[in-house]
Amino acid sequence: MNSEPGRSGQQQVKPPLSEGAKASLAKTRTLFRMFVVSVLGAFFVYQLDVGYLWLATLLTAVGLVLGVFLLVRSIRLRESKLVLFGTISGLVVAAVMVLFIVTTLVLYDQVRDYQACLGRALTDRATHTCMAQFQDVLPTKVR
């Protein structure tokens, strides 16, 4: 009764991928893994210490370059929707990281002093004192 293929409840079988398509897919997956590692690495390195800000900046820049490259590649080749979604999500995280890095660069001395104070703080009261001192030295437009 229903003569359209794929509508009769049977699943259509996709033809096997050519060698070129398999190589392209493997390259896309490798680039995506590198992208994820660089974005997540930047996020975690940023949280370590302000002294590692250069590494977080480098990883974020690498993530942005790989992300744009992957975005163009996944749109042009239409290989994987998961890679496209992951790339867009990772680029959003990288953009937020850029904002964090720029803010930290502008307030570098204050953040360094705050982290040093937190390193010496042994109690909650000392931690709150560090936070109050940090807020006192911030420019009024940042508060």
Image (spheres, grey):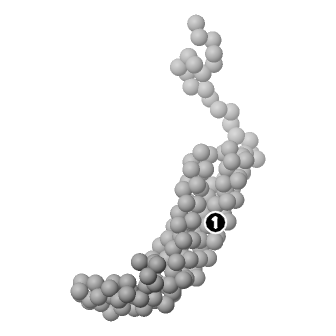
Residue 76 higher or lower than 106, as above or below: above
For residue 33, say whether it is visible: no
Above or below, 108 against 68 in this view is: below
Where is mark 1, residue-wise?
A: 64
Instruction: Name the residue at the right extreme.
Output: 20
Residue nearest the observer in this picture, 41 or 54: 54
Give the x, y percent position of residue 123: 24, 87
The front one of 113 and 23 is 113
Q: Amino acid at mark 1?
A: Leu
Secondary structure found at label 1 = helix
Q: In the image, residue 66 lies at what x, y percent?
A: 66, 63
Work out which residue is located at the far top of the displayed protein and give it. Answer: 1
Crowding at dot 1, Cα within 10 Å, few <14 / some 14-19 / many 20+, comes out as many
Residue 31 at x, y percent in the picture:
65, 60
Q: Quadrant of residue 135?
A: bottom left
Viewer-closest of 30 and 93? 93
Residue at horizontal 62 percent and vertical 29 percent from the top: 13
